[in-house]
Image: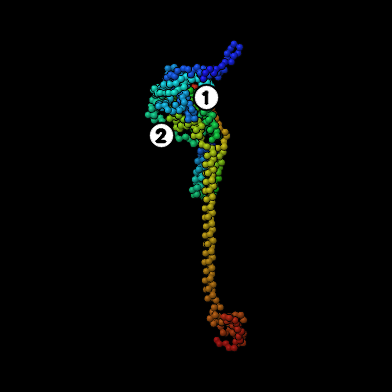
Amino acid sequence: MGRVVEPIVYGDRKVYTVAAFNRGVAWFLRKLPSVWVEGELTELRRHEAWATVFLTLKDRETGATLGVTMARRLYDRLEDALAVGELVHVHGRAELYEAKGELGLRADAIERVGIGDHLVALERLKRKLAAEGLFALERKRPLPRLPRAIGLLTGVEAAARSDLVRTIADRFPAAKLVVCETRVQGARAPERIVSALAALASHPEVDVVVLARGGGSTEDLLPFSDERVVRAVAACRVPVVSAVGHEQDTPLCDLAADVRAATPTAAGMLVVPSADDLHAALAVRRERAAAALRKIADRDRERVERAHERLARGVRALLERRRAALDRAGARLQTLSPLATLERGYAIVRAEGIALRDAADASIGARLDVQLARGALTATVEEVRT
Amino acid sequence: MTEERSFEELERELEEVVAKLERGEVGVDEAIALFERGEALYRACVERLHAAELRIEELTPSEPP
C-alpha cells in the first residue's frame, strides 16, 4: 500500500487524524509474521448473512482475551467442527480493525486441541442432573392458559424485559406482570437468580415465571447453567419458561425449565393467549348459544303446531261422529213419523182438528178432514158404525 | 355475579351453558333463561379482556447473604 499516512503540520508539530493513525498502525501490523496462537474458544458467532465469522479466544492462565476473525468461506471448510469451550490453535496474523482501532487476529486456519475445562465440567453436571431425572419430559408441567400474574426474572439492563412487556401488552393487555430484576452476571449471579426466583414463586398471584436473558457469550450465560439455578428452576412452585441466550446456546436451566422459548418475545407468546383469539372463541360460543336457542324454540313451535293440528283433527272427527249419529237419529225419526205411515196407504182423519180414533166420536153430517200422504180431502160422514 | 371470579371460571361456565343449550333437553323458558345467562357471561368475559392496560408490579428480592 506504500506510504499512505501523511500528517498535518501545525508549525513544528506533526498531527495525525484518527483514521490516519489507525491506517498507519494497520499498515505496520501487516508486516508482522503469521503465527499460531493457543487459547480457549469462548465465543463463536457465525451467521449466514455475514462474510466473516467472529470468535473470541481466552488465555486459560490469565483470562486475557483476543478477538479473532475468519472469512466464512474458510471457516466453513475447516476440518474440525468447533464449539465454544474448546482449546484451539489459531493460525493467522495481527490485524487492526481500522474503524475502531481494535486489534485482532485474522485467522486462516484453526485446529482443535482439546475440550475446554468449563465445558467438561458442564457436561459432567449435565449428565449428573439428567441421571437424576431433572430434565425428564414427565417433569414438564403445562403452562396455565391464563395466568393471574406472570413473573419475570430478568437482568438489570434487560432489553429482554421490554421485549416481553411489549409482546404481552400487544397480545393480552389485561395481563399482570410481576418483575424481579437482578444481576445475572458475575460470581454471585447464581445466588441472586435463585433468590429472585424464590421471590417470584412466592408471590400469591404468580402462576408462571419467565426467565429472560438476552444473548451473550457462553461465559455470560454460565450462571444459568449453575447447579443451584438449575435445581431451583426444576423445583419451582410454578412452571418456568426459560428464554435465555440465543437459539444455539443451551444453558442447563433451559433443560430444567418446563418450556424453552427461543427469545423473550417467544416466551411472551407462550405465557398469555392472544386476546383476539379469545374474543373469537367467545363469539363462537355466543353464536352456538343463539343457534341452540333457535333450535329449541323451533322444536317447541313444531310441537305446538303438531298439537294444534291434532286438536283440529280431533274436533273434526268428533263433529263427524256427531253428524253420523244425528243422521241415524233422523232416519229413525223418519221411520217413526206418521208421514211414513201415510206413505204406506194409511190416512189421518180429523174432526175439528182432532184425530179420530173412535167412530163414535163422529156424527152423521160432520165434516171430516182426511190427510193422505200427499194432499188432503174434506169428507162428510154418511153413516157411523160402532 | 361475576366480579370475584376468574376469566377461566366465567369461560368454563359459559361453555357449560352453551353445551346444556346444545343438548336441547330443556324447555323453551329454561332455554331463554340459559341464553340470557350465557349472554351475561359472554359480556363479563369480554369485559375482562378489555380491562385496563398491562399492570406491572416490581419485586425486590432480599439480597442473598
- Residue A324 marker: none
Q: Nearer the viewer, residue A252 or A89?
A: A89
Please state the horizontal and vertical placement of residue A139, each as a whole percent of the image.
41, 33
Residue on which disc 1 sits: A156
Residue A292: percent from the left, percent from the top? 52, 48
Identify the chain of the residue marked 2, using the numbered disc in the image. A
Between label 2 and label 1, give the one nearer the viewer. 1
Dividing the image into 4 quarters, which one contains the C terminus of chain A? bottom right
Say which amino acid is labelled 2.
Glu
Towards the viewer: A78 or A316: A78
Tell me: residue B30, above or below residue A157.
Answer: below
Tell me which chain the residue with mark 1 is part of. Answer: A
Kindly identify which residue carries mark 2.
Answer: A138
Residue A249 in view in this figure: no
Q: Which residue is drawn at the image coordinates 54% and 43% (left, top)? A: A283
Q: Nearer the viewer, residue A331 or A213?
A: A213
Q: Are marks 2 and 1 on the same chain?
A: yes
The image quarter in which residue A120 lies: top left
